[in-house]
Image (cartoon, grey):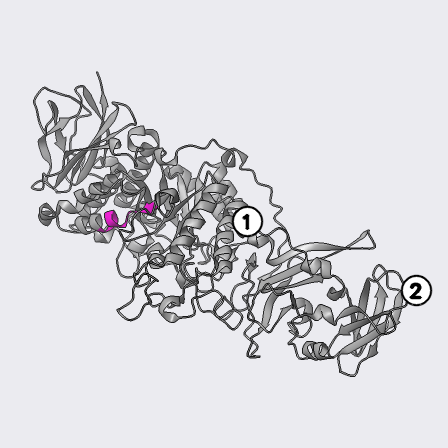
Amino acid sequence: MDLLNDVINARCSDPFKCLGLKPNQDKGLTLTVWRPDATKVEVLKIDSDKIIGTMTTGQNGGIFLFDWPKKRTQTHYRLRIHYGDSQFTIVDPYQFPEATFSDPENHSATLYHKEGAIIRSATVNNKLAIRGTRFAVYAPAARSVSVVGDFNSWDGRLHPMSSNGDGVWRLFIPDVVEGARYKYEIRAANDDILPHRTDPFAKTIEQFPSFASVVCAQNSYTWQDKDWTERPIVDIYEQPMSIYEVHLGSWRKKADGDALSYLELKEQLVPYIVDMGYTHVELLPVMEFPFDGSWGYQPIGLFAPTSRYGTADEFRELVDAFHQAGIGVIMDWVPAHFPTDSHGLASFDGSKQYEYPDPKKGWHTEWNSLIYDFGKDHVVDYLISNANYWLDEFHIDGLRVDAVASMLYLNYSRKEGEWIPNVDGGNHNYEAIDFLRRLNETIYLNHPRCFTAAEESTAFPGVSKPTYMDGLGFGFKWNMGWMNDSLSYISKDPIYRQHHQGDLTFSMVYAYDEQFILPLSHDEVVHGKGSMITKMPGDAWQKFANLRAFTSYMYFHPGKKLNFMGNELAQGQEWSHERSLDWHLLDVDYHQGQQQVTKTLNHLYQTEAALQLDHLPSGFEWISLDDSTNSTLAFVRREKESAEHILVLVNFTPTPHGNYRIGTPQAGRYELIFNSDETRFSGSGYPVETSYKTTNQASHGKEQSIEVKLPPLSTIAFKWHAK
């Protein structure tokens, strides 16, 4: 009776002990059903409408009892439930303990096969399969948990779940299939009923205001990217990687202001990226998030592609199209923090199950969000299984991990006294470090064609070194130092640049300490920082010439490349997620010139092997780094184990140099392969000869040299030929 009282009061932790068929004192079976507000309940055969009997009302309202006929060997049934003049039929979930409690083998990398809403079938009479959904959610501190949804009028009394002591609550509900909307109603240990929670493993989540989880069918999408997913495994560090970073909702909008759908992006974004010559696309987070203004960096549904733009299969179709076009897909992934929305993970079961309990460790002062507790196994398994899920189920090629620095340091963005030191008294978060290492080991072990990249802004050692070398195990690290120094330099008036030559040359001091990506990301064109073109000094012509020269310098500098959408348009407005990129600017020559120079550089990067050796010092050589008076640089990019090379000269002043002598590594002929000052890029067209023969006049420590014409505010490149 105590258990039944718990059921009646929605406090039951094991409804299978009192609901369904249970032995009685007469050595038979009694069926107990809980249906509050029902006026009559009839028991039917499982496979027909034939009535086995009518249940009687127990002493407590809503409890119905029925003594099972001893001559009946079959113990499965359906229930016809009457509410006055209305009625409907259900299959009682409490007759299927095997479908509720049977778990697949549990691996941390595939925890999503065990938890969440998973469609499965229960077999009766060795032939009839009852299809339904098995729900499972981790809430170890809860007093009780119920599934609520359209199928039970969101009534938390009707489908109490059961826990077997491992903290996971489970229930198989027959006839609940794909498309069903649901959440979890959790009663905390103090008896408070919490706001309905979205399933942490939901594969689809509705938008505001419901934020309801949606039951999804098992992945049945037919992929067409076999040539991509089974391509030979190559050394990615010696391959070109030019990344186009995209916020899907604002890349291009429809006439009515709505965002393009996944399928519309397939038709428009994919061919654009191919034409522009990028090798990869990087998507700002597409995991479901409640607030548009977070751009996805405050995710709630880590397993659900945002339904703003379409279904999960339509997102798969977009990824598939990229792969068929030869474009790799990187996704921004956010394990550093999560928001406090009442339907999310915050105080999920009334206790701090996902976040650190102490705000000195569990609260991000910078983003007003919560920090995952990396010391808890379930949290680590949840995050690692999520990373694996995107690579497995959506064929994602790389994860760019957001805000890694905030994970590594306990005192990140905190004042003295606002943080808790580690066991050694230091500021490193050992638990987060262990998590990141395990994450990278899992990804590289299971997905050898995939990679990870860290947005990490400090000098933490070994971010992109293997874990066996005491590194964090990332494949790449964003070079935030290069970004800050180079933008600081290029924003200065050319007359002052001679005093800041070191801002450009310092990056080569540490260029090979990590495997770097050079980022000009969304972070540099928001929150009052202005667009790229507005960072450039001078009149209109000089602004665009500066931007072309700087963009070109980036492509010739060692490191993979990343450009945020709109940089190639040189749009004047700071980026906003609420509006489209300013595509109309391409009607203006200057803007079209910036797009064309970016396109040309991308294609040159893919065809010239000397530009692709980013991770070895042998791929780079300074020729001249100290001509600060003229604000010029000269360096060489080399092919691996070859004499083949490209000579690059950069002039960051508006003054052309008609006879600029520069030493060369080899005697021979140098052919012009790129000039950012060409008229087709809206440059000045300053005359530059297309071929130069070396002479024996020594310069810059070399025995031979050439004398070139160096255009104003330009980057030019020559390819060496022996004859």
The magenta stretch is 477-484
Left or right: 168 as drawn, with respect to 453:
right
- Above-or-below relation of 25 to 712: below
Q: At 10% across and 22% down in the image, what residue appears? A: 703
Picture disc at residue 159: none
Q: Position of residue 40 (x, y in %)?
A: 82, 77
Q: Amino acid at mark 2?
A: Lys
Picture disc at residue 71: 2
Q: At 82% across and 52% down in the image, what residue appears? A: 126
Res. 268 visible in picture: no
Label 1 crowd bin: few (<14), some (14–19), many (20+), radius 10 Å: some
Alpha carbon of mark 1 to alpha carbon of mark 2: how far?
Answer: 53 Å
Is 202 in front, or is 432?
A: 432
Q: Amino acid at mark 1?
A: Glu
Q: Position of residue 53 (x, y in %)?
A: 88, 71
Is 52 in front, or is 293?
A: 52
Picture disc at residue 314: 1
Is 695 in front, or is 699?
A: 699
Inspect the magenta stretch and tell me whether residue 458 lies in it. Answer: no
Question: What residue occupies the far right of the structure in this picture?
Answer: 71
SS class of the residue under badge 2? Answer: loop
Q: Quadrant of residue 95?
A: bottom right
